[in-house]
Image (cartoon, rainbow, N blue to C red):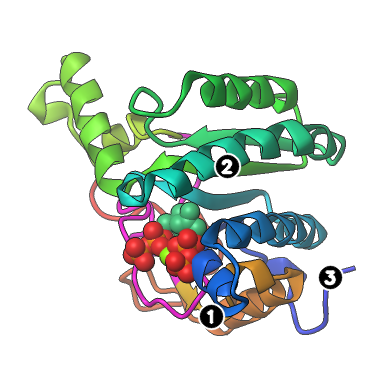
Amino acid sequence: MIPDGIDPQRIPTHIACVMDGNGRWAQRRGLPRTEGHAAGEAALFDAVEGALELGVSWLTAWAFSTENWRRPRDEVRFLMGFNESLLVRRRDELHERNVRVRFIGRRDWRVPRRVLRRMDETVELTQHNTGMTLTMAFNYGGRAELVDAIKKMVAAGVPPEKITERRVRDFLYAPDMPDPDLVVRTSGEYRISNFMLWELAYSELVFTDVLWPDFRREHLFDAVREYQRRERRFGGVTAVQGTGAETGTG
Ligand code: IPE
Ligand code: IPE
Ligand code: MG
């Protein structure tokens, strides 16, 4: 059942969530910041359920940025262990829900090997699932992604005259992933913070004051309602609905 006020014909193909506000959620309760991260798990899995209800094909969740290494060591250590244990605890459930799990981000920099192992196991377990793709952006930064893409492109010997927008996309972390139609950022911060700089070119941005641990599928539905009130033009003059519109010249 699609929730009231949502047009089933115009469900975004790809929704990306910037899961922000965990620390403040905890601080407001007099708890350590890490308790906020722990409480964010319920929010993520309710958002997954909501996305499945809507029939969203791609859901992306940003769990750790390339800049988050600047945080206190204990918090970073907690986040690594927490994300690792979350995969172990939740992957069977995701598999049962026919969710394909993937990761974007810098693999070969700082991420502990045992975390990488859990990520690989989860990807392998769920790789043939067809319900929805849940992409976890982990050790992810938009500039890092572009630097990594340029490195790969140079290493592959792509000559300058062959560089097009499509070719650049081929070297991103997930070339087959459609650009996000809708990005939801929680916690009242109005910025991108180095998220998907290439892919967000024409995404609709929805900001909410809700702190991530309080986020539930109803908030996701509200964001989709807001999205459906927007008119996407992609630089043209007539409204274009839907997704995957290639931009520019490439
Ligand atoms: C988002 O919550 C989670 C991560 C960045 C890992 P924060 O930890 O950024 O929470 P605030 O923004 O400090 O409240
Ligand atoms: C963005 O949130 C990263 C994630 C949600 C994982 P931050 O809390 O790190 O962003 P800033 O520092 O407020 O810009
Ligand atoms: Mg934050």
| x then y, percent, for residue 68 | 36, 50
Q: Residue at x 65, y 54 (%)?
A: 38
* Magenta-colored span: 175-204
**Amino acid type, label 1:** Thr
Q: Quadrant of residue 225?
A: bottom right
| SS for callout 2 | strand
Where residue 208 is drawn, which disc sits there?
A: 1
Check if residue 189 falls in the magenta segment.
yes
Q: Nearer the viewer, residue 236 or 83?
A: 83
Element class at badge 1: loop
If you read the primary sequence from the N terminus, does the residue marked by circle 3 or circle 2 appear first?
Answer: 3
Q: Quadrant of the C terminus?
A: top left
Q: Is residue 54 left or right of residue 31?
A: right
Residue 14 visible in the snapshot = no
| Quarter of the rendering occupied by the N terminus | bottom right
Residue 106 inside the magenta-drawn segment: no
Q: Which residue is mark 2?
A: 135
